[in-house]
Amino acid sequence: MIKNFIDFDDLSFEELQDIINRAIALKKEHNEGVINNSLKNKTLAMIFDKSSTRTRVSFEAGMTQLGGHALFLSDNDIQLGRGERITDSAIVISSMVDAVMLRISSHEDIIEFSKYSNKPVINALSDLSHPCQILADLMTYQEQRGSINGKKVAWIGDGNNVCQTYMQAAEIFGFELTIASPKGYEPNQSFVESYQNNINYCSSSMDACEVADLVVTDVWTSMGKESEHKQRESAFKGYQVNQKMMSVANSDALFMHCLPAHRGEEVSADVIDGKQSVVWDEAENRLHAQKALLLYLIEA
Ligand code: CP
Ligand code: NVA
């Protein structure tokens, strides 16, 4: 059966943990200069209708490092952007490649694509979730502090796609997630109803950070919401992760942000560039985590 990674809980805890462990091993191998051609002659199609730095570079470099090839397909260049049906695109593209990665706005469209694809489909960020990011975040936590099981994670800010994937991960990995979002910017009701285990909501961002082991935030204005930027700037006042907030977290707490970041908005410069921040490892780990994911899905 074809395995997809569209939502974080498409894979079991055992599968996800194996992928993270393999990612850590692949990182070590790569740093030692070991050549790994496990995906020789394999092709990954990467379909984008939104911008990307980390996702594009990590998937593309990852395929090269595994001896394969990645095809960058912007919706401006392929017929999908001119109205070809998503289902027709899925049949054609998947008949020629070994896996398909999509960063397209509509989560429903990724699911629709997967129904007609005969190769694994990876969600590389949709309006609802960002599973590849959380895979890298959990790998980073494990590298820095060991198991995240039983730890306290504070999500500060927009209840967006990244936050919603943290909700899916909290139950699977057994960490306690406290979400502090301004009114009107909470996670989607469907996520609130579907994912309740290990999740708390808090009106104060300071209270959410209290004794946290990990503090995470993201931009106030996600891609596609640019017209709301002014309104969001005022709604999110008080939701900036700064030293005051970090000071109530555990003394060995880590700070993560999926990037791109806006210093002075969702995070102060001294936090993101400070000692508790692991954002550069987190970004680099997209490469290693996705190499392990590609191996798992393509070799399955
Ligand atoms: N974090 C992340 O997905 O970054 P990009 O938008 O640059 O791919
Ligand atoms: N929430 C952000 C994440 C970017 C990687 C967005 O959707 O734009």
Image (cartoon, rainbow, N blue to C red):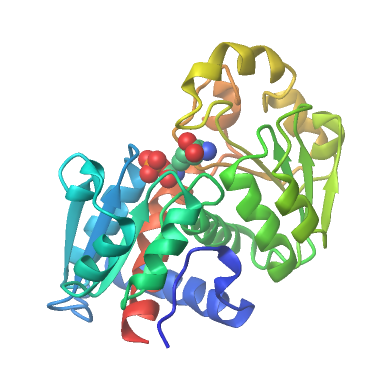
Between 41 and 77, the residue placed more toward the observer is 77
Q: Give the quadrant of the N terminus.
A: bottom left
Q: Is residue 250 left or right of residue 19?
A: right
Q: Is residue 208 left or right of residue 37?
A: right
Q: Give the quadrant of the C terminus.
A: bottom left
Q: Is residue 239 left or right of residue 287?
A: right
Residue at image location 64% in from the left, 60% down from the top: 145
Does 157 appear above or below 136? above
Residue 298, picture quadrant? bottom left
Between 85 and 257, the residue placed more toward the observer is 85
Q: Is residue 288 visible?
A: yes
Q: Where residue 279 appears, x then y in whole percent?
A: 50, 42
Between 51 and 285, the residue placed more toward the observer is 51
Q: Where residue 210 appears, x then y in whole percent?
A: 85, 39
Residue at image location 42% in from the left, 70% down from the top: 23
Q: Where residue 144 appears, x then y in whole percent?
A: 58, 58
Residue at image location 56% in from the left, 48% down from the top: 128
Q: Is residue 280 visible?
A: no
Farthest residue in the left direction? 41
Q: How many marks?
A: 0
Q: Where residue 287 appears, x then y in whole percent?
A: 35, 58
